[in-house]
Image (spheres, grey):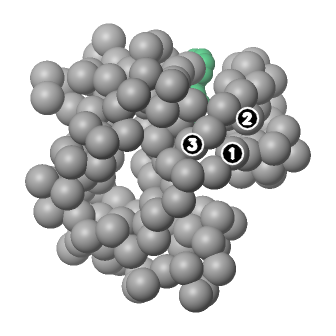
């Protein structure tokens, strides 16, 4: 799978704002195939573990609280050059700096509540996919 998959979450802000369908449509139109998909909610412990690389950042507590505050959609996506191409589709972390037409520009509320997650490397895509899905849930 390496090199061809990325992992995404539609974050609690975008789920609460009713954007699941529109975001999945943009993902599909951008050429990504859905390999795994579920509506779920992170516990505080899950969010702390998922974002532990950011533990020393000043926004870590806020990030953990937000990501565990409501349901998310987790998905594994497949495409050539998946990690890099998906980061182009979602746009900059801060929606104010995101390009027109990107998911964050269209649907994010703020830098903290920024609608979607995208893996930052092939290695992390695999780790993140396995954090959320068992082998039998990835098709
Ligand atoms: P993401 O790239 O998915 O993973 C790390 C998250 O930390 C990032 O999205 C933002 O949601 C969040 N984040 C990054 N910078 C800030 C910030 N300055 N303030 C609040 N949250 C942030």
The C terminus: image quadrant: bottom left
Please tell me whether mark 2 sits on a helix, a strand or a loop.
Answer: loop
Q: Position of residue 123 (x, y in %)?
A: 53, 70
**Are dots 2 and 1 in contact, CB under 8 Å?**
yes
Residue shown at the point (29%, 49%) measured from the top left:
24
Crowdedness of circle 3 by 10 Å Cα count: few (<14), some, many (20+)? many
**Are dots 1 and 3 in contact, CB under 8 Å?**
yes
Q: Position of residue 16 (x, y in %)?
A: 51, 25
> Residue tagged by mark 1?
41
Please tell me whether mark 1 sits on a helix, a strand or a loop.
Answer: loop
Residue 55 seen from this side: yes
When asked about the image quadrant of residue 51, the answer is top right
Label 2 and label 3: CA atoms lie apart by: 9 Å
Q: Position of residue 72 (x, y in %)?
A: 57, 42
The N terminus: image quadrant: bottom left
Q: Is residue 54 left or right of residue 94?
A: right
- The foreground one among 11 and 21 is 21
Crowdedness of circle 2 by 10 Å Cα count: few (<14), some, many (20+)? some
Label 1 and label 3: CA atoms lie apart by: 6 Å
> Residue tagged by mark 2?
68
Residue shown at the point (53%, 59%) measured from the top left:
38
> Residue tagged by mark 3?
72
Label 2 and label 1: CA atoms lie apart by: 6 Å
118 in relation to 36, above or below: above
Q: Position of residue 96 (x, y in %)?
A: 32, 12
Please tell me whether mark 3 sits on a helix, a strand or a loop.
Answer: strand
């Amino acid at each position: 799978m390496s090199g061809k998959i990325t992992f995404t979450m539609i974050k609690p802000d975008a789920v609460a704002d009713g954007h699941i369908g529109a975001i999945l449509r943009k993902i599909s139109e951008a050429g990504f195939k859905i390999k795994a998909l579920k509506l779920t909610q992170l516990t505080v412990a899950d969010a702390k573990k998922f974002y532990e690389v950011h533990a020393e950042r000043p926004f870590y507590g806020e990030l953990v609280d937000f990501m565990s505050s409501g349901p998310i959609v987790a998905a594994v996506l497949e495409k050539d050059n998946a990690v890099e191409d998906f980061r182009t589709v979602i746009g900059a972390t801060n929606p104010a700096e995101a390009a027109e037409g990107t998911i964050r520009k269209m649907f994010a509320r703020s830098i903290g509540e920024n609608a979607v997650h995208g893996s930052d490397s092939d290695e992390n895509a695999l780790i993140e996919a396995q954090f959320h899905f068992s082998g039998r849930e990835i098709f």
